[in-house]
Image (spheres, grey):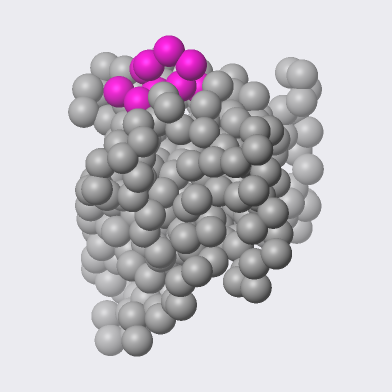
Amino acid sequence: MGLYDTYLAVRHRLHDGDPPEHVAIVITERDLLANGAFDTLSAALGWAFEYGAERVTVSVSVLDAAVVSTLVRELRRIDAPRRVVVRGPEDEVLDGGVVDGGVVAGSVVDGGIVDDGVVDDSASESETAPGDESGTDSERRRRNRRSDAEGQRDGRLDDAPIRITVGLGGKAEFAAAVRELAVDVDAGDLDPESIDPADVSDRLVFPEEPDLVIKTGAERLSDFAIWQSVYAELYFTDVNWRDFRKRDYLRAVLDFQDRQRRFGR
């Protein structure tokens, strides 16, 4: 670590403000296709946990659908400091990933945990498996999409500390949640008068709200987590992803610590 990086790290450690517990990083397909981009992402994930984060969400915006399978394949191989779950657009099957839970990840297969090719169905037998056909249609859909809530209950890797979406835009994600709500209402499983923000959140791919969103390369957020990031602190840097360093991450964290969060008030 250079002298300036050390200075920033000391400032962070002595700062009265809490660091962000949930960090979101927004990058583009062009960012990831540059030389060394995956190494930068691996390092950034390490910095996040080193400096106080408990969860990291990475959103990869994609213009060319043809590169999605390549990106997913490489992201499944990334050297990460914590467990990783990767999801693609419309929860479709990408590069041999999981269908039932919409999860596409090298370490999650059909609801079981894979370690060196061995599947361990560690979910409790009392819990409903993702592909279980019991219950109403709406209940099955919610089980398949609500990865975080289920992961916390049954200990599966769906609730991995690192979640990555590839080509899954915020508008598309929100539209899918609205469609699911409409289907549930039409089926008589949901009273439209009772719909609240929690009903929407339950139907999102990754429902948790980030504390800090970092966007490199330009001051525009792109189509990212429209619902989840409404109260997040946004940090834009002109530094391109290929040049992103620990000092740039620390600047983002210090900027967050300096802010007074208002949560829309």
95 relative to 209, above or below: above
The image quadrant where one finds the C terminus is bottom left
Q: Position of residue 235 (x, y in %)?
A: 38, 54
Question: Is residue 35 part of the magenta span, yes or no?
Answer: yes
Residue at (55, 48) in percent of width and height: 250
Chief secondary structure of the magenta span? helix
Q: From where the camera sits, is residue 240 visible?
A: yes
Q: Position of residue 96 (x, y in %)?
A: 50, 20
Task: Please give the range of residues in magenta.
Answer: 30-38
Question: Is residue 3 part of the magenta span, yes or no?
Answer: no
Q: From where the camera sits, is residue 131 visible?
A: no
183 relative to 105, above or below: below
Say which quarter of the image contains residue 138.
bottom left
The image quadrant where one finds the N terminus is top right
Q: Nearer the viewer, residue 159 or 1?
A: 1
Residue at (77, 19) in percent of width and height: 116
